[in-house]
Image (cartoon, grey):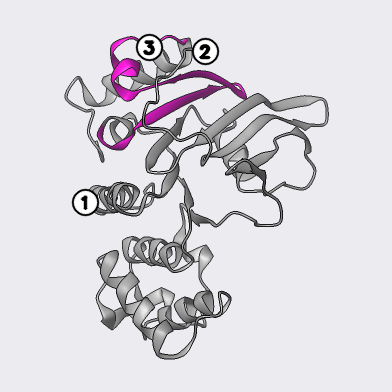
Amino acid sequence: MTSMSSSQARPEMALTLSPLSIHHGPRPLVQEVSLSVPPARLVTLVGQSGSGKSLTASALAGTHLPGLRYSGGEVRSGGEVQSGGGVRLAHVLQNPRTAFNALMTMEAHALETLATLGVRGATAQSRVDEALTQVGLALEVKPLYPFELSGGMLQRMMIAIALLRKASFVIADEPTSDLDPRAQHRILTLLSELVHHHRLGVLLITHDLGVVAAFADEVHVMADGRLVESTTPELLFERPQSAAARDLLSAHRALYGEEGFHAGA
């Protein structure tokens, strides 16, 4: 695995995953994967379907799926072991509709989030308005139900809720796969802006190397449950070290050509 220079990283504050292995019966799904998400960085995890990306990300979030055997995978933040949701971490999902209660308005979801933090009343209302504005949603969405919003608007609402929770880290698992190219670019641009303005650490799982080229600070490549390359986007495109990275680049160029390395390509 190639080494990565990360002069801007702050390891003492990063969300880190110690060597993780996951098995389904005797079959290894993830093998000795370590990962770090520093604050104020957008880290991408790429690989073919079935390479172990989502399993690794779910373990980083503290989620263990039934029927699988986990070993290692200790999660730390700020030097302390995290368990039981100790770190403020939010998710942005591929299908945002699954994250919302169909019987609750956007305002109700937001106020419920703040209530768990002990924030209520006028202060909560003000915080909701501020978060909606930050993610580019009009305040008119507050009385609306999930079915009344587009997929892109729901993605923005998920990000607004992450801000309300004062999340330090966000895991975004293929968040734009169900969106049209214009909405994809808007959501990814928003995440990138929040990384820099709010010092969020973001782990973005994607199969789109155009997204990596446009938005990533760091990129990790997975293949067959292993982390096979960790580098910068520039070095990945110029001098890929792993067969998996070369295969991904070849497939992308076959679809989009040399000019296809942009978000939403």
Q: For the residue labelled by badge 2, is the local secondary structure a helix, a strand or a loop?
A: loop
**What's the residue type where badge 1 is placed?**
Arg
The residue located at (19%, 19%) in the rendering is 258
Queried whether the magenta region covers residue 234, the answer comes back as: yes
| Quarter of the image that includes the C terminus | top left
Give the residue at mark 2: 1
In 3D space, how far apart are the residues under numbered discs 2 and 1 (Cα atoms)?
Answer: 35 Å
**What's the residue type where badge 2 is placed?**
Met
Left or right: 181, with 164 as reference point = left
In 3D space, how far apart are the residues under numbered discs 2 and 3 (Cα atoms)?
Answer: 11 Å
Q: For the residue labelled by badge 1, is the local secondary structure a helix, a strand or a loop?
A: helix
Q: Earlier in the sequence, mark 2 or mark 1?
A: 2
Q: On screen, 3 above or below 161? A: above
The residue located at (64%, 56%) in the rendering is 86
Task: Write down the region rendered in magenta.
Answer: 214-242
Density class for disc 3 (Cα within 10 Å; few <14, some 14-19, many ≥20) is: many
> Mark on residue 182?
1
Left or right: 10, with 185 as reference point = right
Left or right: 32, with 218 as reference point = right
Give the residue at mark 3: 240
Q: For the residue labelled by badge 3, is the local secondary structure a helix, a strand or a loop?
A: loop
The residue located at (65%, 41%) in the rendering is 75
The residue located at (46%, 26%) in the rendering is 220
Q: On screen, 192 above or below 151? A: above
Closer to the eye: label 2 or 1: 2
Front residue of 101 and 17: 17
